[in-house]
Amino acid sequence: MKDTARKFFDSGSALPLLADGAMGTLLVARGVPPDANIDELNLSRPGLVAQAHRDYLAAGAQILEANTFGANRFKLSACGLEGKQEAVIRAGVELARKEAGSSALVAGSIGPLGVRLAPYGRVKAEQAEAAFREQAALILQSGADLILIETMSDVNEALAALKAARAAGAQFVGVSFTFTRDGLTLLGDSPAGVARAAADAGADLIGVNCSSGPAQAIRILRAMRAAAPKVRFSAMPNAGWPERTGGRILYPAGAEYFGGYAREFAEAGASLIGGCCGTEPAHIAAMRAALVSFKPRSPGASVVVEASREERIPDAVEATQFAARLASGKFTISVEVDPPKGFSTHKLMAGASMLAEAGADVINVADSPMARMRMSPWAVCHLIQEKFGIETVLHFPTRGRNLLRLQGDLLAAHALGVRNLFVVMGDPAAIGDFPQAADNYDIVPSGLIRMIKQSFNQGLDHAGKDIGAPTAFFVGCALNLCSRSPEKEMKNLQKKIEAGADFILTQPVFEPGCASAFLESFRREYGELKAPILAGIMPLYGAKHAAFLHNEVPGMSIPEEVRARIDRAGERAPEEGVRIAVELLKDLRGIVQGAYLMPPFGRYDLAAEVIEKLA
């Protein structure tokens, strides 16, 4: 078999070759049911697959990937297609070959088997190699020029596929990995680690695909090249991180934005670039346009890649959506929910769903509010994020946790996908359900913020020992804008800011003038406050509720005029409380960057009304 692909890559051009974009998400966007087997479409709807290839070729793609990504015995058997593997693969390669003609190369796409390999699953390495070899052999026999092994998260599986492709006769094999927002594979391997492993195994091309968007891919690409500078590399990211909207999965990165990264990939030394999930022919055309006007380095020039320690690549960590929204200056709305008292989450999840539909940007989950026993907030955060695709903020009190438990809890939260933390002291056990419970703590909020930002987010624990990889926490602190001891409050706030606090949530505000006065005093004493503030807003429910807050909750003061309005409203007090909340937020808009809504008594519908009236 002629090594056409190697000659193509060695043709002398300093520009990267351009691959195509997504197949699965493109076909779904063109009407294919989301639950359809994409590979089987080579047989049942060949015209649709061929049209996708034609469109990518017209957009400027130089390599077309055959629609064979999931055509292995395990995935096909799961769909009842075990007897059609040869037909599916031959049709897939032939469809791409016919459209490519002499204008482009055809790559056979090989994805994960869809089953876990030992020691994480029951499929042995030799079984995996046999399945991959079977798939690769059919791809090569059908006329593919090269093989691209893609979207791998298990290094052992990737190496098994590489070994199998070689055994099947492949002359040119690329191996590409997918990464989480933390810059690691799902099994915890770093970009540098997988790059070295693939290079040592003899891969001709190593890359990053799928994952998040171009911004993450460029960082991972650089880390990979630093670890294995003598190998060719590829970058084919998604069109941004997928978002769930109205029951559909959407990818936010447009063609123009995506195309803008083509030059950066070239500058970083990529030999092959393209797109993955969410990308369409327009994205590839934008990349082609960017490359046309790109002036590559002279043939003898080398790409400078900074060395980095593989276990620590903080810049490879994606910002949370909450952090990105605040950084963009958009007014951000957060709503607090309380975990259930038992193990049933039905009511809570119904409330969270309503808040997400109403337009909340993030949901705060309290931790044992008022020292009352409730479900672990980590579980609630995880459930909400998994089911509704909306980010959460985990309340993380220091009270009642020793230093050992604090750090274990942080690792647990991170493992569950929780990245936004609100660090507080927490309510004393004496006021709650178990006044006899231990109430000790080893660290104050400013100290915990410092430990998270300066140790955990750098890959170290409190003692300076390695935890394997940096965490990616976005950390908030508490503030009382209307404190009766403003000097003390300002001093504590400054400590939290110096420790690295990223954002601020305040206690309920009922006097906008008080808030602006506090911030002006802080500016005079400590300089401009750069951390964004989400002002606490609590819709009042009735006269008794207002009286209780004013008289019995430390640090809270409700103006007499506001209490009088609620009293006059009588049975319509909740509606009046919503109106007051909206008025307060309109007055605070120029002072703070968002709202932190605290609906009373689980009345999440009141928070939803506030959000809708603001919109």
Image (cartoon, rainbow, N blue to C red):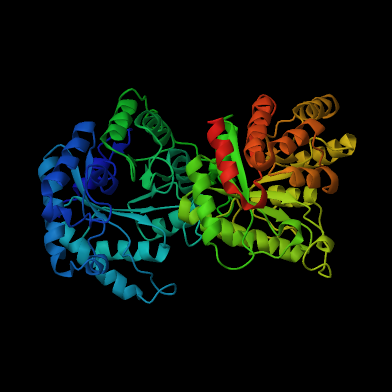
Which residue is at the front of the view, 486 or 475? 486
Residue 88 shown left or right of residue 614 in the figure: left
User: Residue at the location (73% across, 33% down)?
Assistant: 565
User: Residue at the location (19% across, 68% down)?
Assistant: 80
User: Residue at the location (89% across, 39% down)?
Assistant: 488
Which residue is at the front of the view, 508 or 303? 508
Q: Is residue 163 above or below residue 582?
A: below
Residue 291 appears in the rendering: yes
User: Which quadrant holds residue 507?
Assistant: top right
Residue 105 shown left or right of residue 442 in the figure: left
Q: Position of residue 171 (x, y in %)?
A: 23, 55
Classify the position of the N terminus by image quarter: bottom left
Q: Position of residue 351 (x, y in %)?
A: 54, 52
Which residue is at the front of the view, 122 or 424? 424
Q: Position of residue 339 (x, y in %)?
A: 62, 59
Q: Position of residue 29 (x, y in %)?
A: 26, 42
Q: Is residue 297 above or below residue 598?
A: above
Residue 474 shown left or right of residue 232 in the figure: right
User: Which quadrant holds residue 375?
Assistant: bottom right
User: Which quadrant holds residue 536?
Assistant: top right
Residue 233 appears in the rendering: no
Which residue is at the front of the view, 476 or 415? 476
